[in-house]
Image (tube, grey):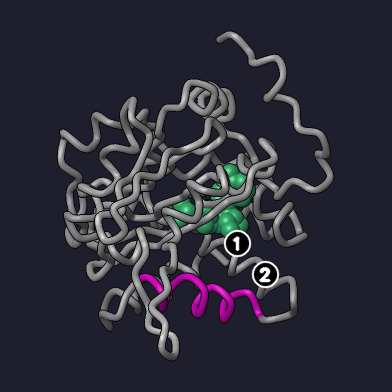
Amino acid sequence: MKKLDNASEPKDTANLPYYKSTGNEIDVFEHAHRNKLPVLLKGPTGSGKSRFVEFMAARLGLPLVSVSCHEETSAVDLLGRFLIKGSETIWQDGPLTRSIRMGAILYVDEIAEARPDVLVAIHPLTDYRREIYLDRKNESVSAPSSFMLVASYNPGYQRGWKELKPSTRQRFISMQFDYPNSKVEEEILFAETGVLLSIASQLVKLGQKIRNLTELGLIESCSTRLLVDAAKLITSGLPPRLACEVAIVQPLSDDRDTVQALKDIVSLMI
Ligand code: ADP
């Protein structure tokens, strides 16, 4: 793959957030940015998507505006609204409009969870127009070349997640994220928490064991985030099994039998 000459080398690596690359995602992102293409990061929760975007924004020297979508998130929340202040009515930009004016990277987390009018509002941003229309103000806002739209999406192969329409998906370059291999995941645990490598290795094995136990029927499996949290608690002095129970077992399930099964696995492996 052709490397970019100017944007690819960060000016100050010491100030970049820690991100362990697992493939060619840095190159792909930089090429997408240069070509003004929006990017969709697909993958399970806690697999490093947000950290990657933070890292890329810092690497490109751009501000980052993040929005987490939920089922109530509407276009007005993102675009902006008129507010009454005393006797005056003033316009307040929403995060999407603000990020365009700033030429920032806009990260729309869990885009499929938002209301359909959000997708309608961002459509003109994802094609050659690269603009939004504020109908309440009758104003079009065009994105400067540094602006980039990045969205995340958790594919709906497990129950409880909304699907993203094919017509929306086709408006984005897409990158798949997944939990890293053991060696890389151990390295992340160590870099993030300073945990002993022997413990990092046990935690990673535990994570893999839980991910392979599909019969537990977990909505989301054991993410790198949960392993990092357990490693943090262990590093700060909490007994390892207790750390695993509160950071891994309890967040994964409310079902008594499943919790007991997970606790048994922890006792065996940690
Ligand atoms: P997502 O956005 O996919 O839900 P995050 O980016 O918030 O996940 O990742 C959760 C945590 O996992 C991060 O805070 C970080 O500690 C760790 N992590 C996961 N993948 C990586 C990676 N490739 N490099 C560095 N840290 C990572």
Q: Is residue 217 left or right of residue 80?
A: left
Is the CB–ligand 1 distance for label 1 below 8 Å? yes
SS at badge 2: helix
The reply to whether dot 1 and dot 2 touch (C-beta < 8 Å) is: yes
The foreground one among 41 and 235 is 41
Label drawn at residue 67: none
For residue 205, above or below residue 262: above
Could you tell me which residue is drawn at 62 percent across and 49 percent down?
63
**Residue for badge 2:** 232
Query: How many C-alpha atoms fall within 10 Å of the one at disc 2: few (<14), some, or many (≥20)?
Result: many
Could you tell me which residue is drawn at 30 percent across and 45 percent down?
122
The foreground one among 2 and 214 is 2
Label drawn at residue 228: 1
Quarter of the C terminus within the rendering: bottom right
Q: Position of residue 234 (x, y in %)?
A: 68, 73
Query: How many C-alpha atoms fall within 10 Å of the one at disc 1: few (<14), some, or many (≥20)?
Result: many
Amino acid type of the residue tagged 1 in the rendering: Val
SS at badge 1: helix
